[in-house]
Amino acid sequence: MDVLSEALASMRTGAPHSVRTDGHAPWAMRLPPTVGAGFHVVLHGTCWFYPFDNGTRPIELGSGDVVFVRDGAGHVLADHPDTDPEIPRPEQFITCPPVGALRLGGDGPAASLLCGNYHLDGQRPHPLLRQLPEVIHLPARPDRYPELAAAVQLLRAELDNPRIGSHGIVPALIDSLLLYILRAWVEDQPRAEATGWAAALRDPAVAPALDAMHGDPAAPWTVQSLADHAGLSRAAFARRFNAMVGEPPLAYLTRWRLTTAARLLREDDLAIEKVAARAGYSSEFAFGKAFKREYGLAPGRYRRQARAAA
């Protein structure tokens, strides 16, 4: 079981939105806060990125660079930090499949970016997301992030020269880009210095226990049976898991079971009794009580509201 893929899938609530932005100096675009996580891929040229409300120093971006904004915080993209930013007007956006298009600025040197947003459940984010930096900047380094670099190159080729199949290829690449970004960030953390989930996903004891819980959340796991997967004593495993994941093993298991149930309620037509069973609950009553305690709604009502909002 791929814990990273499962964790992200549990938070995804819709397809990503994206726009190709072509800026010609002088240009500066102020992007207000959004729900979910933002991303920018520099397809050509150079530009600057900076959040506008926390004093972070501007980051210079080059061709192939990727920026991930964890909580969709407001920020600015510009040809230079001194250029006054403006919020793009709706009439500036052009419908141009496979992604929208936006042109800004004057007649100076050009930069081209793919800008977008992933819809993630911010009310109950997976703890992996909470431990990410607010902004992740991944410079173009084929020697260090080869898969991410390849995905960027494929996106650039499809957007520069749309052909047969581009309407299906580009959304799939944008979808996979999120996993490439987070994989690159996790693997970029030196093993000796990594903490939290960056360490847990590669830890020889904690990672197998996470794989086991994600692979079969309905199994009657105990701290001892998970410790057996980890190859540690019960006490040593519990301490190590808590230190990296941020909560005890069975607390995480309960969270993951209910997260799994919420995803099934949103995306599947299974009867609630079967959802309860897949989440490891022996009765619909026990499941309903636990689900309402976590989500504030009975499972049936949660399903109706989630689908009405989709």
Image (cartoon, helix red, strand yellow):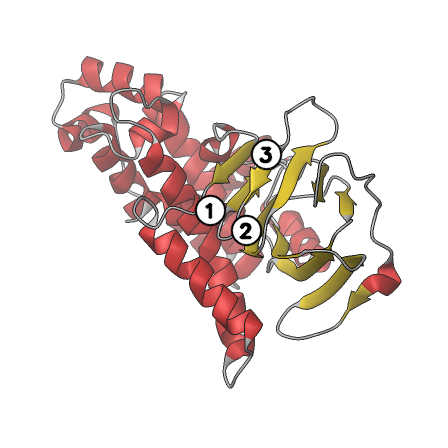
Residue drawn at (68%, 56%) of the image: 109
Disc 1 + disc 3, Cβ < 8 Å: no
Helix, strand or loop status at disc 2 = loop
- Report the Cα–Cα distance between label 1 and label 3: 27 Å
Task: Name the residue that disc number 2 marks.
Answer: 12
Disc 1 + disc 2, Cβ < 8 Å: yes
Q: Where, by quadrant of the figure, is residue 232 drawn?
A: top left
In percent of width and height, residue 102 lies at 75, 62
In percent of width and height, residue 237 lies at 22, 20
Question: How many residues crowd around disc 2 within 10 Å: few (fewer than 14), some, or many (20 or more)?
Answer: some
- Report the Cα–Cα distance between label 1 and label 2: 6 Å
Out of 258 and 48, give the one closest to the viewer. 48
Foreground tag (2 vs 3) = 3
Q: Which mark is residue 305?
A: none
The kind of residue tagged 1 is Leu
Give whichever of discs 1 and 3 has the lower sequence position: 1
Q: Where, by quadrant of the figure, is residue 128 drawn?
A: top left
Out of 16 and 106, give the one closest to the viewer. 106
Which residue is the extreme one toward the front? 108
Residue drawn at (70%, 67%) of the image: 100
Residue drawn at (44%, 62%) of the image: 153
Q: Is residue 225 above or below residue 278?
A: above
Residue drawn at (54%, 40%) of the image: 288
Out of 29 and 168, give the one closest to the viewer. 29
Task: Name the residue that disc number 1 marks.
Answer: 8
Disc 2 + disc 3, Cβ < 8 Å: no
Task: Name the residue that disc number 3 marks.
Answer: 59
The kind of residue tagged 2 is Arg
Q: Is residue 240 left or right of residue 31?
A: left
